[in-house]
Amino acid sequence: MISEKMAQAINTQINREFYSAFLYLAMASDAMNKGFKGAAKWLRIQFNEEQEHALKFAKYLEDQGAKVELAAIAAPKTEWKDLLDMFQDTLAHEKKVTAWINELNTLAIAEKDYATQNMLVWFINEQIEEEGNDQDIIWMLEMSAGSKGALFMADRTLGKREG
């Protein structure tokens, strides 16, 4: 049985994952408004992934006999200077998410909650991938700085993401 403290921490993370989804949807809208259809597609796929993460946490709580408690989700920022600024924000945000996942794991270890530790391994690995993908995109955008043709190609590359 999961402790109340662990369940509450996971509930907090569920709401953070939904905020992450809102953030990526806001980014997708801004990218589309700036004419970057490829980036918008990439960000919408990310929006869907973040919702899946929230649902994965919720199902875990339910499977553990704990109640899922949802809270209001704050409105995210809605405009960025350019794609580089946007993806720098995605990396900064994913680093926060990594820290939150690590805090959950630290709590699970302290509580000797082996089931939660096991479940969190998937999220720890996911965060390694998320940060790596964001860093790769930032490098691509930095290399395209000052070249509209290179930025166009970067946007096309982002649009090839499958989800």
Image: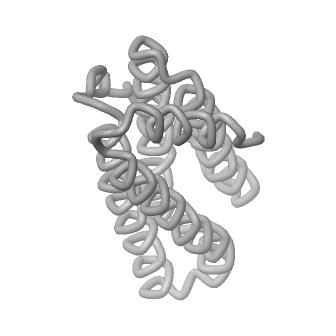
Question: Taking 34 as reference, is 135 above or below it?
Answer: below
Where's residue 134, x and y in %? 46, 56
Residue 51 left/right relative to 131:
right
Which residue shows up at 35% across the image and 68% down it? 99
**Can you name the residue that lies furthest to the left here?**
81
Image quadrant occupied by the C terminus: top right
Where's residue 49, x and y in %? 64, 43
Image quadrant occupied by the N terminus: bottom right
Q: Which of 85 and 116 is in front in this view?
A: 85
Question: Taking 33 as reference, is 136 above or below it?
Answer: below
Which residue shows up at 49% across the image and 23% down it? 36
Residue 16 left/right relative to 7:
left
Where's residue 5, x and y in %? 42, 64
Which residue shows up at 42% across the image and 66% down it? 98
Question: Taking 28 as reference, is 16 above or below it?
Answer: below
Which residue shows up at 49% across the image and 44% down it? 17
User: In terms of image quadrants, where is residue 103?
Assistant: bottom left
Q: Which of 110 and 29 is in front in this view?
A: 29
